[in-house]
Image (cartoon, helix red, strand yellow):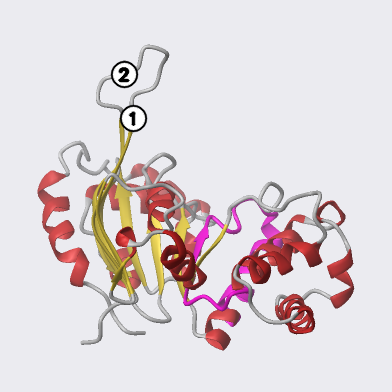
Amino acid sequence: MTAPLLDVRNLVKRYAPQGFSGRGGDGVLAVDDVSFAVAEQETFGLVGESGCGKSTAARCILRLHEPTSGQIFFQNENLLGLKGANLKKARRNLQIVFQDPYSSLDPRMSIRATLLEPYEIHRIGSRKEREEKIAELIRLVGLPESALGRYPHEFSGGQRQRIGIARALALSPRLVVADEPVSALDLSIRAQVINLLAELQERLGLAYLLIAHDLTLVRHVCHRVAVMRRGRIVELAETEQLFSAPAHPYTRRLLDAIPIPDPARARERRAAPRIESVERDEELSAPLRELAPGHFARV
């Protein structure tokens, strides 16, 4: 079996106590012993309720936040052992699409300047080559070349997110972290952006780490899914297996919360007996955390 593209092992992130006195107990344990792997060209979903630690885990993988402990291997190289120029070089293969297309773009920079910035930071190509690359990028995400001379406030939310995707693809990464990439968009625009991500994955051979709470979206696009609760992964499975036969009571509660457009079926679900409590989930979550590092599939 080939090695995974990304291999996260026993990741922990604890935030220090807050307050003027420096007192605050042990701080906040946002990510607690999280392990999973992502294969080449796979879309791996990380789901859970708000505050469960999924976005924090993703940002630790990118070294936007420094993990408290654990190991993160990308292409068999430990990212936590990299500093300076070596970390900068590794980041070319790891990019992110942020949730909010309004705040993730600098309003003072034109789209041309925004897309040129990664090439300038990494000193890639001549001026002419950079201009050719950004023209190709903007067309790749479905926007006209004339968009390069405009500013973020001149675009709709969906168009801004396309620009954010173009910026993430500028350095030809192998893994893109998509942190709730459509949650801030109108419902009519979400399908367009998701279809664009799928097309780019097929065309460019990308792997995605998709952070989401919309389980309908996750079922549509992900190959495998990990469910997080209170900083831990409580279930990890192939997408169809997880949706058809969820093993953990918390996963079943998440699935039961998905709206059903059929009123008759919705009434049947409300009439069904409540599932067992999710308070004692350690017995199920512990073995899954042990299996997670080696559990991945080539897709």
Seen in the image, is 94 located left or right of residue 191?
Answer: left
- Label ID, residue 16: 1
Q: Residue furthest top?
A: 21
Give the SS element for disc 2.
loop
Indicate the position of residue 185 as horizontal and vertical percent values.
67, 54
Indicate the position of residue 15 as horizontal and vertical percent values.
34, 34
- The residue depicted at 35 percent of the width and 43 percent of the height is 271
Indicate the position of residue 155 as horizontal and vertical percent values.
83, 58
Is residue 7 rendered magenta in the image? no
Callout 1 amino acid: Ala
Query: Where, by quadrant of the figure, is residue 225 drawn?
Result: bottom left
Relative height, residue 79 to residue 24 (above, below): below
Is residue 178 rendered magenta in the image? yes
Relative height, residue 281 to residue 162 (above, below): above
Dot placed on the residue nearer the N-terminal end, 1 or 2: 1
Relative height, residue 81 to residue 197 (above, below): above
Give the magenta part as a residue range: 170-199
Location of the C terminus by quadrant is bottom left
- The residue depicted at 32 percent of the width and 55 percent of the height is 227
Nearest the eye: 162 or 264: 162
Find disc 2 in the rendering and name its residue.
24
Seen in the image, is 172 located left or right of residue 2?
Answer: right
Indicate the position of residue 262 as horizontal and vertical percent values.
52, 57
Location of the N terminus by quadrant is bottom left
User: Are circles 1 and 2 on residues that touch, CB within 8 Å?
Assistant: yes
Seen in the image, is 75 located left or right of residue 264?
Answer: left
- The residue depicted at 43 percent of the width and 63 percent of the height is 87
